[in-house]
Amino acid sequence: MSKQRIRLWDLPTRLFHWLLAGLVVASFVSGKIGGNAMDWHGKFGLTILGLLAFRLVWGFAGSTYARFVSFLPTPAKVLAYLRGQWRGVGHNPLGAFSVFGLLLLLAFQVGTGLFGNDDIAFRGPLYELIGKDLSDRLTGLHKLSVNVLIALVTLHIVAIAFYVRVKKDDLIRPMLTGWKDVAPGEGASASGGGALPLAVALLVAVATVYGGSGAWLPTPPPPPVSAPATPSW
């Protein structure tokens, strides 16, 4: 059967995907190392926050297959996929669950991390807004949810390997090049996105990172100076 080449993933979506993958690995490693690496852990987390904010905007203003509406896993789509009747390009209905699950879990991870602490030297940039008790609870959730994140990432990788090796559907190359060969009539090249939506998405990302960094918080007052002890004599 002859194939036609379509533009599937736009450049911003591809950059988002690979940057996010690298930052998740870097965050996991730096968190496990601890100590001085926690400063980098915090920086990686803020960068992930910016990427998630960008993706949220791009999910509505990006090109065709980057928009959430294009791969929203409705019951009808899931049922058609399970019956082998789904035809389309981009994320399939089950893959869409993985995408949304990962995005939501990463948002939870970053959100709890902003308020967390390590009981030694690291405090999240928004720690001062909530205090130690609530920060400790959020830190516990932050650590526990790492296990869920590892499971989802593993499932994501296994599913990709299954499609590449068993179903002979290369999902990796389009995420590198942006192009995919499809059967005639299976899909059209992506449209939309553009410079203005990209600028808006980047602006929202920068503003979100600034908000999460706590740079806007007032500088806490210095601790009171203790009066010198009065000699007993």
Image (spheres, rainbow, N blue to C red):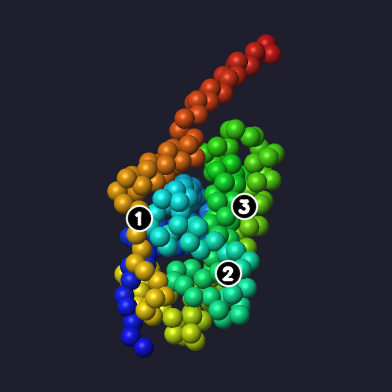
Measured as percent of width and height from the top left, residue 101 is found at 58, 61
User: Label 1 to label 2, Cα distance in Å?
Assistant: 23 Å
Farthest front residue? Answer: 185
Q: Are discs 3 and 2 less than 8 Å apart at CB?
A: no
Q: In this view, does 220 lie above or below 22?
A: above
* Residue 77 image position (x, y, % from top left): 58, 69
Distance from disc 1 to disc 3, alpha carbons, whole Å, reads 37 Å
Q: Name the residue under label 1.
A: 192
Q: In percent of the image, x 48 and y 61: which residue is there?
A: 70
How crowded pointer 1 is (Cα within 10 Å; few <14, some 14-19, many 20+) is rated as some
Residue 46 visible? The answer is yes
**Any mark on residue 77, and which?**
2
Q: In front of the other: label 3 or label 2?
A: 2
Q: How many marks?
A: 3
Please indicate, yes or no, whether residue 117 appears anywhere in the rendered image.
no
Residue under pointer 3: 142
Q: Residue at x 51, y 81 (%)?
A: 162
Q: Where is residue 151 drawn, in percent x and y?
A: 60, 68
Image location (x, y in percent) of residue 82:
61, 77
Left or right: residue 135 compared with residue 123: right
Q: Give the alpha-carbon distance from disc 3 to disc 2, as whole Å.
A: 33 Å
Answer above or below: position of 180 versus 110. Answer: below
> From the image, which quarter does the N terminus lie in?
bottom left
User: Which amino acid lies under the numbered mark 2 shown in the image of this protein?
Assistant: Lys
Give whichever of 211, 193 is nearer the camera: 193
Earlier sequence position, callout 1 versus callout 2: 2
